[in-house]
Every structure is written in C-alpha cells, then in structure tokens.
Image (cartoon, rainbow, N blue to C red):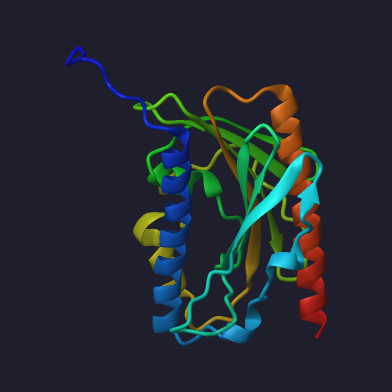
C-alpha cells in the first residue's frame, strides 16, 4: 500500500463526531447555567421519546437522547435529540434546543467552530434556514435545516445575510459576555429547532426536500408543545 494513501473516514464516524459535539455543547451551556443562578430550570420544557412520531415521511425513528443532566435537574431539559433513518440508511438528527438565547442565534457559527466550512446558506419561506457545509479533510458534506422561535412560540425572521462571528454575540467569548452583561435582566428564551444530516456528496434536490419536510413537521410539534407548556 502506498504511503501517500489515506484511508477515508467512514461516514458513521463523522456522524458520531457531530453527535458528540452536540452533547459537548449541552454540557458547556449546562455548566454555565448551573453557575448562573438567574436561570430557573422550570422554564425549560421536558420532552420525551414519544414527543415526536415514530415515522415522518421516509424517516423512521431509531434513537432518543433525553439530555439527562442529573446533577442539575431531573427534567432532562435544554437540548434533546431524536435520530431518524430512511430505508436507504440515510441518518438524520432532529434536535430541540432550549439554551436561553436572546433574539436570533446563528447556528452556522456553531458548526463552523467544530471544523465545518460553510458552503452555502439560504433562507426559504416560512423562516427556515438551509445551510450546507463541507469538511476539507474528508469528502463528506453536511446539511443543516433550522429555525428559531421565541418564548411565545412566534417564528423569528432570519437575517438574509450571514452574520460573521465578530459581528454578533453568538459565538466565542462574547457568548459568555452577553449572558454576564444581561444577568440582571429578565431572560427572554428563544428556542431552536434543527435537523442535521451527513451525506457523502452534495445532497440531491429530493434529499434536501425530505430534510425540509422533516424539519417543518418536527418544528410544528415543538412549537405546539412549547406553547401548551407556556400556558400552564
């Protein structure tokens, strides 16, 4: 075997890497919330495996991550994920994120911070953002479909133009500075619904359409359950 030959990383390893990255984000935010006693854990909605249907279009449910932060609270709140798969073996992660952002949170920055390069970002109807990424050292591509809605369940209008990290408080140390500077202000929660998928090549129009359908359906259910939760 030639010394210049490089063994390709299996797609499942990349998928696992991103999945573990989501868990790492949970842990970092949870550690901060534990330190910042201005947060009240009863503001977060606990979801369960059955909160989403077992099948949505071509997608079949396979796994649920309840985000059980036992050292903080037994509700399993903040970030909760469902994994779906098609009959062809295409996997997707559906996530409902309750991490206390204010206003718009640009999710693209989070994926860029884990090594993904943003290839394209577009805003489509119904306040949905579709972003595609690539990882230079691998052949895999990633597609993320996401939306944000506020504490009253109203969808937020995404900016048409991508906001660079240095122009916003959503990334890096400024994320912490934003929380610290607003620590004495009432917390206005915004929630994030996203779908993440890895494909070996650029996803086809049909695959992208299926991802958008999966996102819109799960977002609808998240908003409905959140609104019901807020009325209690």
Asked whether 199 or 125 is in front, the reply is: 199
Q: Which quadrant holds residue 58? A: top right
Asked whether 166 or 65 is in front, the reply is: 65
Taking the image as drawn, is residue 167 in sight? no
Asked whether 65 or 167 is in front, the reply is: 65
Q: In the displayed structure, would residue 74 be above or below residue 62?
A: below
Asked whether 86 or 194 is in front, the reply is: 86
Q: In the displayed structure, would residue 229 be above or below residue 217?
A: below
Image location of residue 184, percent across then percent down: 50, 84
Image location of residue 16, percent across then percent down: 45, 47
In the figure, is residue 111 to the left or right of 132? left
In the figure, is residue 64 to the left or right of 136? right
Q: In the displayed structure, would residue 178 be above or below residue 230?
A: above
Quarter placement of the C terminus = bottom right
Q: In the displayed structure, would residue 53 be above or below residue 129?
A: below
Image location of residue 201, percent across then percent down: 54, 22
Q: Which quadrant holds residue 10? A: top left
Give me the residue at 37% from left, 40% from top.
115
Give me the residue at 45% from left, 73% from top.
30
Taking the image as drawn, is residue 62 in sight? yes
In the figure, is residue 211 to the left or right of 136? right
Give me the residue at 41% from left, 30% from top.
135
Image location of residue 213, percent across then percent down: 78, 41
């Amino acid at each position: 075997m030639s010394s210049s030959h490089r063994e390709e990383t299996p797609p499942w390893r990349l998928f696992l890497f991103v999945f573990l990255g989501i868990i790492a984000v949970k842990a970092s935010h949870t550690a901060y919330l534990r330190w910042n006693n201005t947060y009240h854990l009863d503001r977060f909605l606990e979801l369960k495996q059955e909160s989403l249907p077992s099948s949505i279009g071509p997608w079949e449910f396979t796994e649920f991550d309840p985000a059980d932060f036992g050292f903080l609270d037994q509700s399993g709140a903040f970030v909760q994920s469902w994994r779906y798969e098609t009959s062809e073996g295409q996997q997707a992660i559906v996530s409902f994120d309750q991490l206390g952002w204010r206003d718009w949170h640009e999710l693209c920055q989070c994926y860029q911070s884990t090594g993904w390069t943003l290839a394209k970002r577009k805003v489509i109807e119904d306040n949905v953002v579709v972003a595609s990424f690539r990882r230079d050292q691998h052949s895999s591509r990633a597609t993320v479909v996401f939306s944000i809605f506020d504490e009253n369940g109203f969808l937020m209008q995404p900016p048409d133009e991508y906001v660079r990290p240095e122009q916003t408080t959503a990334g890096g140390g400024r994320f912490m500075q934003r929380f610290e500077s607003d620590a004495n202000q009432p917390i206005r929660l915004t929630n994030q619904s996203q779908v993440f998928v890895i494909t070996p090549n650029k996803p086809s129009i049909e695959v992208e359409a299926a991802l958008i359908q999966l996102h819109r359906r799960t977002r609808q259910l998240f908003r409905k359950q959140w609104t019901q939760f807020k009325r209690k």
